[in-house]
Amino acid sequence: MKRLVSLMLMLTMAFSLCSFAQAEEEPVELRWLLYTVDYAPKDLDMVAEKLNEMSAQDIGITVDFDYVTNDQISLIITSGEAFDLCYTSSTFNDFPTNSADGIFYDITDKVRTLTPTLFESIPEMLWDATAYRGRNYAVPILKDYAVEVFWRFDPAVFVDELGMEIPETMTFEDIEPYLAAYKAAYPDSYPMWVKANGAESNENQVNWIVKDIMLCTKFVDESDPEAYEIKLGLEMDEITDRYRLMHKWYQLGYINPDAATLPSVPNTQYSPVRSGQGWFGAESIWEGQVGHGQVISRYVGPYLTTTSVQGALTAISAASEHVDEALKFIEYCNTNVPYRTMLRYGLEGVHYNYNEDGTVTRTEQGAQNYNPLAYSQASYAVGPAEGEGSDNEMWQKVFASYEDAQVSNTIGFNFDDENVEMEVAACKAVWSNYNSELRTGTSDPDVVLPQLIAELEAAGIREVIAEAQAQLDAWVAENK
């Protein structure tokens, strides 16, 4: 009887220990705010289930993948809603402002000691360039972190049909003969469909300090007297000459008439000419998006700027209860090939298939139902390239090519608008009333610009420029 009681006690203790161990092994769940223009991928739930099975087993972490728009993440941040990780950049979920406001956790020390593999996988220059006041508040995402902007052509029209050659590089204005040739061949069509922001990424020929109110510096040698001079882009030929060209093209019927009110140009809208920021090798991705051939010609860059290197980062909430786990998860995303591949492309056989050369091609279901913005997730260099015939070593070559990029004199400088916050807000409101009509060519810049600049001056733009100049002068004195 005693032996039976002892056995029962042992079994009870064993079950108790087993239950305790299972409780201890429950994975930590993190909430990750990711970027979307409109809505989450339709097949997110089925992909997330498999992703969480993998990460729970490998590192004891699962994730609530929450795809949010710019407006939604602004509300989350201002309301103090809980999250663990988020996508941030110079243009989405304002990285410098949120770093200054204490929204993001200072990972400077932890990323070097807790996740050395992650730290060493990212060039030191990126850690330095994305630092805010000398501290790291986010992990840079390895993507096209230098600015290169391309004209994108449908070769079936321009090469095969019209017999035109497309050079590897060209200028912004060099596109005009191609637009004219297409319009002559197809008078009832528009050769270049444009959304309210204008030709994609076409204002990156200057170094932006505060893009929302058009403050910038020139890309010139640091010995040039203008190298560290803050300018209003609306007073620079580099910007305004392109507005004049866009207006000319709009009047000639090269641009869709509803451009100024069009929030986006869907990939399903045929446009024989498009503009886009990318890299040599991005053609295969663009082909998969638009469903026809793409030949590209670079007309801007490559430039390395504060804005470009802050183009994609992953930050951890300063209020997170799982900072260490969040940092380990970021390392996992950026170093684990199977996980990163599923995160980007979805489920093999459902959303994508492998090609014989080791690249992948999305299925129709993948293109429609699981095609998230990969640059908001993790490194492009981890996992297979998209498009049969693409180079799986492409990203290593792209990053190597950036060694020859022109580096902005002000890389690492971040403007703090605390002293002119009201003026900045007022100037943003003024610029928002005009930017679409200028960028799309809808209005004549020679008529609009004087009125716009006068309104900006009334809103305090000169005071903002003076404050930005004072901060830049102090930064140069300390860093140069």
Image (cartoon, rainbow, N blue to C red):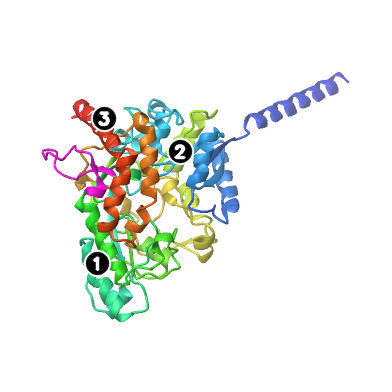
- The residue furthest right is 1
Q: Earlier in the sequence, mark 2 or mark 3?
A: 2
The alpha-carbon separation of the residues under discs 1 and 2 comes to 41 Å
Based on the displayed image, in which of its 4 quarters is residue 469 positioned?
top left
Residue type pointed to by label 1: Ile
Disc 1 is placed on an element classified as helix
Q: Give the vertical position of 140 relative to 386 (above or below).
A: above
Q: Is residue 269 visible?
A: yes
Q: Is residue 391 visible?
A: no
Residue 261 sits inside the magenta stretch: no
Query: Mark 2–mark 3 contact, CB under 8 Å?
Result: no
Q: Residues within 10 Å of mark 1 (few under 14, many from 20)?
A: some
Majority secondary structure of the magenta segment?
loop
Residue 216 sits inside the magenta stretch: yes
Give the position of the C terminus as an image quadrant.
top left
The answer to which of 338 and 410 lies nearer the viewer is: 410
Q: Residue at x 37, y 76 (%)?
A: 189
- The residue furthest top is 2
User: Where does the image place residue 39, in percent across and percent down from the top left?
Assistant: 54, 53
Mark linked to residue 175: 1
Which residue was labeled with disc 3? 471
Residue type pointed to by label 2: Ile
User: Magenta span covers which residues?
Assistant: 215-235
User: Where does the image place residue 201, in percent across and percent down from the top left?
Assistant: 32, 54
Mark linked to residue 330: 2
The answer to which of 400 and 287 lies nearer the viewer is: 287
Q: Residue at x 30, y 51 (%)?
A: 451
Q: Earlier in the sequence, mark 3 or mark 1?
A: 1
